[in-house]
Image: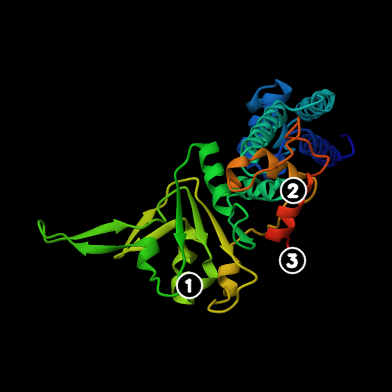
Amino acid sequence: MRIGSGGALHAAAARALNEAAARHINAYEFLPGTERIQALARVTGYEASSLAAALHYSGSGRAEHLRSALELLEAARRRICSRTRDPDMEIEASTLNRAAELLERLKTAIGQAVVGQADVIEQVVISLAASGHVLIEGVPGLGKTLLVRALAQALSLAHGRVQFTPDMMPSDIIGHAVLDPTSHELRIVRGPVFTHILLADEINRAPAKTQSALLEVMQEYQVTLEGQSIVLPKPFMVLATQNPVETEGTYPLPEAQLDRFLFKVEIGYPRSPRKWESWCARPPIRPAMSCPSPRSNPFSTSGPCSACSRSWRTRKLTSR
């Protein structure tokens, strides 16, 4: 300090304190100046005014003032380094653990209804947590509607279903305005898109004009009717399906529409032995089938009996 290096010492001490704070305080480098001082005061226990004066020392004061500022900066740095974890980080970790637990419970609840599609359920739950939408590709009869219903019931949310056809208009999805005969004013009739979870079944069977009705809905989470913007309820999620086998009379989704989806999930038939477990564990889905030699354990996964195997081959339920 006697040879004029006090400014360099102060800059080095302040830089060391900021580096230590960036390592131990969550998102410290993204905080503005005032919030940085408050975060340092909360972690170190020193007063915010003293820390601000020490960090913004101009070098015009006496040597005693510079020495006090350097000592305070070094003591604050040591206190930060001695802490194993920041309170904000502890709160964030507990919040993340709680969220992970809730998502696992959600997947378990959906898996009780949709059997043998663990990968599909996981991707749908991830998309829900990320506020995204899912495009499901698969042949009919694999439980896509059941998946949406199970997801909505597990979350206690309203859900809707729209069957896309070539003659469908955009007003059939988002709604339209009608003239009220009593008040002689336009009254907005909301479409099925005003829900929490929307199933757009066979979305590629509608022309591009109808598909474009979901562009604003999926991106802005709102609908514009007669110049009035109506915000959709939150959370909002679109699960669209398309059949990869039947291509006659379909319209490929444009790139702008595909960009709205977070995931494209290919759903197929359950794999063995899970498919046999789902076959035997859900008797209502095969009421016309009877097994002449029932087992003592109907939920066994060792394989189907001969009658079940013959019926399975007859119905040709394979992914091909």
Q: Residue flagged by tag 2: what amino acid is it?
A: Ala
Q: Is residue 76 visible?
A: yes
In the image, residue 296 lies at what x, y percent?
76, 30
The residue indicated by pointer 1 is 206
Assign the C terminus to one quadrant of the image: bottom right
Image point 55% across, 37% down: which residue?
A: 154
Q: What label does residue 307 carry, if any?
A: 2
What's the CA distance linking mark 1 and mark 2?
A: 42 Å
Residue sitting at x 68%, y 57%:
267
Q: Residue at x 70, y 31 (%)?
A: 97
Label 3: which residue? 320
Location of residue 68 by image quarter: top right
Q: Which of the two residues, 52 or 164, is positioned nearer the viewer here?
A: 164
From the viewer's perspective, tell me whether residue 141 is left or right of residue 7: left
Q: Is residue 83 left or right of residue 174?
A: right
**Where, quadrant-wise, is the N terminus in this rendering?**
top right
